[in-house]
Amino acid sequence: MTITFITALILSYLVGAIPFGLLFGRIVGKDVRKEGSGNIGATNVNRLLGKKLGILTLLCDVAKGFFPVFIASVYLPVGDNWALFVGLCGLAAVVGHMFSIYIGFEGGKGVATALGVFLFFSPWSILVALVVFVAVVWFSGFVSAGSLAASGMIPLFIWTFGESSSTIFCATVIAGLIWFKHSPNIGRLRKGEEKSWKTKKKEVE
């Protein structure tokens, strides 16, 4: 079990570490780390490369969170620590996205990859979190604020829907990491310097 779990943990990290946004950018001749927000996630890819590649990046980042935990749930032996081990594989995938070995341990903010992880454990929690995300983004104008609100509340939603303490623990750690990676955004929000999609919409009009 120990060797199987360690192998699953490493593979989950390596899958999560695949920088899809960066790869898609290179296909069209752009380095998304050097333009826009400098992030490899779907929001910056959408801003720089268009909606199609932005959506593709989002789907791939979600998938690399979902499939490691799905596969781990199938192949890891069921036992007292099964939920914890599977949850840690999800955590490893998110850490991989945030600190990718393929690009010098840099990476994205982990929201989409975490979405994939939580989608496996508690789809209803994700549904509620998406409502929170959309509402906060709509009223505030800041995608980062929506991500912070939804990720911060996801452990509570998972607890509400009766998931195991191990799942709640992993969700709490992931939420904390997402907030850590959003530290620059939090600083800009406090200073009133964060970019708003509402401002961009007005500029286009």
Image (tube, rainbow, N blue to C red):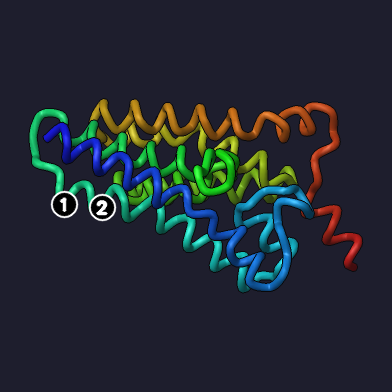
Report crowding for label 1: few under 14, some 14 to 19, many 20 or more residues within 10 A (C-alpha): few
Q: Residues within 10 Å of mark 2 (few under 14, many from 20)?
A: some
Q: Which residue appears at 88% of the width and 60% of the height?
A: 202
Using the numbered discs, state the Cα–Cα distance from disc 1 to disc 2 in whole angstroms. 7 Å
**Residue type pointed to by label 1:** Val
Residue at left 46%, top 42%?
Answer: 96
The residue that label 1 is drawn on is 74
Q: In which quarter of the image is residue 163?
A: top left
Most foreground residue, 13 or 61: 13
Q: State the image coordinates of residue 190 (x, y, percent, origin top left).
A: 79, 27
Q: In which quarter of the image is the C terminus?
A: bottom right
Left or right: residue 54 versus residue 10 is right
Q: Where is residue 12 in the image (x, y as percent from the top left)?
A: 34, 46
The amino acid on which the numbered mark 2 sits, given as a three-letter code, is Phe
Decide if residue 7 is on the left or right side of residue 123. Answer: left
Residue 60 x %, y %: 47, 61
Residue 62 occupies which quadrant of the picture? bottom left
Q: Is 173 drawn above or below residue 76 in the view shown?
A: above
Judge from the rendering whether residue 36 lies leftward or rightward of residue 113; answer left or right: right
Where is the N terminus found, in terms of image quarters?
top left
Is disc 1 in contact with disc 2, using a CB cutoff of under 8 Å?
A: yes
Label for residue 70?
Answer: 2
Compare residues 182 and 34 and report the one nearer the observer. 34
Q: Position of residue 92 (x, y in %)?
A: 38, 38
Q: Which of 197 and 41 is in front in this view?
A: 41
Whether residue 35 is visible? yes
* Secondary element type, mark 2: helix
Task: Tell me the residue at 48%/32% (across/down).
Answer: 175
